[in-house]
Image: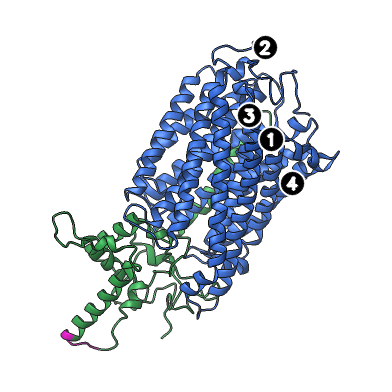
Chain colours: A blue, B green
Amino acid sequence: MTQDNRSGRPQGRPSPGDSRLSRVEAQLRGPFLLFFVSAVIWLLVASVLGLVSAQLLRGVSGEVFTYGHVSAAQHNLFIYGWAFNAFFAINLWLTSQLGRFELRNAWLVSLGAIIWNVALTYGALSIFAGDLNGFSLLEMPRTVGPVLAVAFLLSAFWPIVAYAQRPTGHSFASQWFVVGASFVFPLAYLLAQLLVLWNPASGVVQAIAHSWFIQNLLLLWLGGSALAAVYYFLPKVLGRNITGYYLASVAFWTFFLFAGWTGTASLLGSPIPVWVQSVGVVGSAMFLVSVIITAINFHGTLSTQSGWSLAWNSTTLRFISFGAVAFTLYGVLNAIFSFRGFNAVVRFTSFSAGQEQLLTYAFASMVIFGAAYFILPRLTGSLWPSAKLVHLHFWATAIGALGSISASLAVGWQSGKQLADPAVSYAQVLTASAGLASASLLFAILLLVGHVAFALNAFGMILKSSAPAAEGRHD
Amino acid sequence: MTNPKLLIAGVFLTVALPFGALLLSSQVQLGDLAPAPEEEGGALYPATVPGLAVQGRDVYVSLGCIACHTQQVRPSGQGSDIARGYGDRPSVARDYVLQSHVLLGDRRIGPDLANYGARVAPAPKGAQTEPEKAATITKSLAAVHAAIHHGNAFAFLYEADAKGDFAPERADALAAYLLSLRQDYSSPEAKLKK
């Protein structure tokens, strides 16, 4: 089974001014751009907040900009603002491509986009105003939760509809992942809202519910959506089959089966039943099955017929194969550091932030960038304004991501080792890691530079795009 | 894989299984936990906290303190929590049953606070006279307020309001909350070594 170009429609960049959009694409152009522009704006806001929070660790503060507020807002805006909006857009596009789905009710999607972003803005402002909760990624006031859930259904339920209505008999791996991700998130989000904020479970059960939710959000929704994009773009751009594609269904089922069990590994040593912690450790190890299979699929495809060098020369694949490698690294690292001995060292340090960044930035965000380089020229009918900015974007984000993730991991490991000695105080640990901490500030600046380059290029292209939304090539 | 109903049903099961196995069964296991006496017929622990401390807890949440401070002591095999003096015993689920929203935290940029009250104001050994008690309270409050300042970063909690009244109500509530944080009692799951 191939996912290569099936109908001879234009690939990659169309010639400037050419509005050879398929009708399917013309219908989702509006909502796609709405999501995408919001995503990039939130990405810029989150990168600036990332810089601010790095500075705040050095002792600058105020009532509104406490470190707790800034880091919570940064985290939420990066995930719910950037990654969610971007995947709403990309999943919608993937769905329409693979299932020939015609989005007749584009206004519903746009309504979802508006509700999502308005609610998110309110939630972020509330965090700064001091109206926040103590659970990461559930910090926004609880009234925001149901609104976001409704907006999610309006924006992201379409892949499921499209899958049920698809005209062809067979299906692609990308479709499974998009359908699964779109189905899991609202369920997990509403249950977590209920058990953690609205009708709190007894004591530490809240913490277990929270860790379960975080894993559903990061792995199943973000990870699942990003895997769908890799499964689509890799064969599409290379023009060849996925190596060992018959394994993809095993990858899908093991991914969904085990991801939900990995969460409690982040609570090792916490006052929760030990069996719950052990289940998390086992889950993280079992999750390796899906990591290995996706590695065979992705790296195998890239390793045949000089795939890596082809990928390097395609902007889309350069980002996407970066992400594919990052996902494999994440899975391995996650399994290793779920074991009690290693986990005891790095627990409560910046290590887990580094792990999360490996998943949400080096994997998911890089895949989003790659997908954007493929989709946006088609939807806008114009070229990326500046090749230099594309290069700047890649190098700044690749080096920035590698640098800041390695810095978080290294600082986490180093300070964890030091803290194992009870005589070492927190002040001493902070001093010892000061060098690496200022390096991570530098990498945060580099990431911001990359994001500004991307935003300038993307906004420039959208603004000068000439393809009218209503007209389209009828195929 | 081609049948949408089967796909959705399968995905639903993969979400429902961990939910049922991890969440529902730990709710069954832990849902009925209640404060327990240290010894037969003794006072119940965890003790209910004063109203000011409940208000202080809201201040703690609203300032985002949880970004840097955890409230959990790991067992001695895992990490140096007990050796560092964060507690004399590991935290257990029963310690949190009275909290409407648990604030375990997952990042330590500053020290753990599960036993902050017990560290600043240890339980007195033997009987104290009234003036001694008053002196202890003054001393521990001064220590807590000094810690809340974090150098100068949280000095805004102590600033005079617009009318010029000196009203550090939030700081007082926060101090009461921090002093109420103590796991220095024996729990059926984790006895203190005498």
Q: Is residue A146 left or right of residue A91?
A: left
Tell which circle, 3 or 1, labels the residue nearer the N-terminal end.
Answer: 1
> Does residue A387 lie above or below A349 as drawn?
above
Residue under label 2: A475
Q: Which one is in front in this view, the residue at disc 2 or the one at disc 3?
A: 3
Crowding around mark 1 (Cα neighbors within 10 Å: few <14, some 14 to 19, many 20+) is: many
Give the image location of residue B139, x and y in percent: 25, 79
Q: Secondary structure at mark 4?
A: helix
Kind of residue at disc 3? Trp
Q: Quadrant of residue A180?
A: top right
Q: Is residue A415 visible?
A: yes
Please give the residue where the numbered disc 3 appears in the rendered image: A384
- At label 2, the amino acid type is Asp
Q: Secondary structure at mark 2?
A: loop
Of labels 3 and 4, the one closer to you: 3
Which image quadrant: the N terminus of chain B? top right
**Pick the front one: B71 or A125:** A125
Decide which of tag 3 and tag 4 comes sooner along the chain. 4
Which stretch did the figure color magenta? B127-131
* Disc 1 target residue: A316
Towards the viewer: A268 or A6: A6
Residue A25 x, y percent position in the rendering:
60, 20
- Mark 2–mark 4 Cα distance, whole angstroms, equals 36 Å
